[in-house]
Amino acid sequence: MKLLLANTWLPTSAELHLFSPELVLTGTIVAVLLVALVAGRRPQLSAMIALLGALLGVLATAHVARVVGDGGLGGLAPPGEPPMLIADRFSVFFKLFLFVLLAAIIWLWLTGTIERRMRATSRPVGDVGGPEFFVLLLTSALGMMLMVGSLNLLVIIIAMETASLPSYAIVAADRRSRLGAEAALKYVLFGAASAAIMVYGVSLLYGRFGTLDLGAVAQASSLWSHQQDAGATGTDWLFCLGLAALGVGVVFKIAAVPMHYWCPDVFEGAPIEITTWLSIASKAAGLGLLLRIVTTLGGAAAGGTHHTELLAWAIGILAAVTCTVGNLAALRQESVKRILAYSSIAHAGYMMMAAAILVAPAGTAANVGISAVVAYLLVYLLMNVGAFGAAALVTWHAGTDHLSAFTGLGRRAPWIAVPLAVCLFSLVGLPPLGGFAAKWFLLVALGTSAAAQPWLWGLVVIAVVNTAISLYYYVRIIRQMFLTDDATLPRLQVPFGGLALVNVCAVVILLIGTLWFSPLGERAGRLASNLYVQPTPPALTLQP
Amino acid sequence: MLTIGLTHYLVLAAVLFCCGLYVMTTKRNAVGILIGAELVLNAACLNLVAFSRYRTGRLDGQIAALFVIVLAAAEAAIAIAIFVNYYRLLSTIDADEGRQLRG
């Protein structure tokens, strides 16, 4: 045994330190299970442990953030090999993002349990909880963290499945809900199909370049492009096919066109805490992975080769179609959960536009697209937690999420109606709210990069037109709350925890739109400044 | 005498992939769609192992294939649990019968 270990590579403690957020999360998962074994099935106790784990995770991430320097760090691989996991400020940002979101979701769940206990005699429909609920939630968070922190295609596949599989199950967490069962069925079928196609794409990339490391793939493909540029220009079809199949899996996670069909159904059928979680976390992780892939492939190519151009066009077109489809479909919805689902598709489209910025023009900061998405995601988190949280409070009360449940909310529950209106106006992107800051940074990033890729102006126009379209359906909810009223409807009694959550979101959105406008941009720019770069490309030896 | 080479494995994998894609798009039974996805995953496994044996000479492709097999098993377990739950509530396993959520 000793002899065996002597020749085996093991990670050093310094490397393990870098991945302490993931380790804390894994420890929390085990703790939730073990405590349930000893103390019995107590949903609130499990929730408290999960909340504690999320807060510890924030501390661990803050610790890692100080260690990670410029250029990021690779780890968990023998010396000389490409890293299995990487830690840079970009991945640290996503870890922090997911931990904060986890805490908010668990807080919302706790509020919901108190709310439901207040009004119901027996266990009502829509009541979810227990250790397995939190284990699934935390495991999907773990998968999402790994998704953004790797360049190895195998690790990316495993991370995506770790994120997806618990999400499928947790959608049907309420085992008596027919809607939940149907939503989970649709989700798992779409997910299994797209994951399988993605794995096939990875196998093609592996065959084409002989490596599972995305950095080495980027090196090899750019080398190939330069050889081609010298002679005839052609397209490497196997590379494009592999990349497209890989993209199917990523696009499914973001819920962008053409893999968006699951999104509204799943969001409507799932418990509202899970809808909030999926609408933010799943999209954020998918976008992070997309940006990671795109910057790796585009960065190595060093200035607009044939393939990066193709990739940028493909992403740009998908982004434009996604936000248009999301906004147009939202116009004719009656369920608030569905309106917010389509609005999240539209916002995924806006954020994907930034991923189309592959070639930064000379003289501008590198990775403007990434800093725009980072800023957008931060604001998106607040807007969606606020909007879904307010919708949850109303839905628990009325038993339905139909638009009519929001009638006269301005009189019946001003402390829900006002923050919800702030979140909705911010989702439109009106000043002086955070949503305007997010859209402003995005459009500026697109505009400055248009010097190298003139067609990006097209995306700017589409984003602005879409913003105008989206005004209609967000204002519809606000009109229902403030301009229609039914005197027979009583005032709403809502738990304090939920009110605190949505009001804090609304206040921070206001602050970002005014006082924190430029700090947000600077912070986001710094987060995007030190993407991990592979030090030396490993040599490839392919048999003929 | 015919020697089996990389091309044969790749053609077999491509055929498996197309069968899987066909099954996934035409079947209405949820279990059928899942089997289609498994066919595609097996095609990917075959690709990985064949490339690893004939092209790179490294073991990473074969290790990846092992991981993919484990993932496929985990996915099937979750999917079938969801199917059972669906069947218990709606007495059908037809994916097209789910019509409560639309719009």
Image: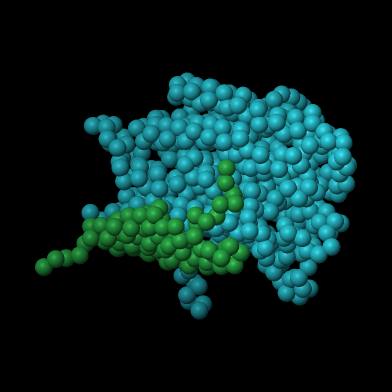
| Chain painted cyan | A
Q: Is residue A64 visible?
A: no
Seen as rendered, the residue at the extreme bottom is A1
Position of residue A101 relative to residue A464, above or below, is below
In the picture, measured across the screen, residue A355 lies left or right of residue A121, that is left
Q: Give the residue displayed 45% in from the left and 21% down from the top.
A: A454
Residue A177 picture quarter: bottom right
Position in image of residue A391 (x %, y %): 74, 43
Residue A129 picture quarter: bottom right
Q: Give the residue displayed 86% in from the left and 47% down from the top.
A: A494
Q: Give the residue displayed 41% in from the left and 58% down from the top.
A: B27
Quadrant occupied by the C terminus of chain A: bottom left
Position in image of residue A152 (x %, y %): 46, 53
Position of residue A238 relative to residue A302, above or below, is below
In the picture, measured across the screen, residue A332 lies left or right of residue A540, that is right
Nearest the eye: A27 or A172: A172
In the picture, measured across the screen, residue A496 lies left or right of residue A462, that is right
Position in image of residue A45 (x %, y %): 79, 64
Nearest the eye: A107 or A305: A107
Position in image of residue A365 (x %, y %): 55, 28
Q: Is residue A129 visible?
A: yes
Position of residue A97 relative to residue A375, above or below, is below
| Chain painted green | B
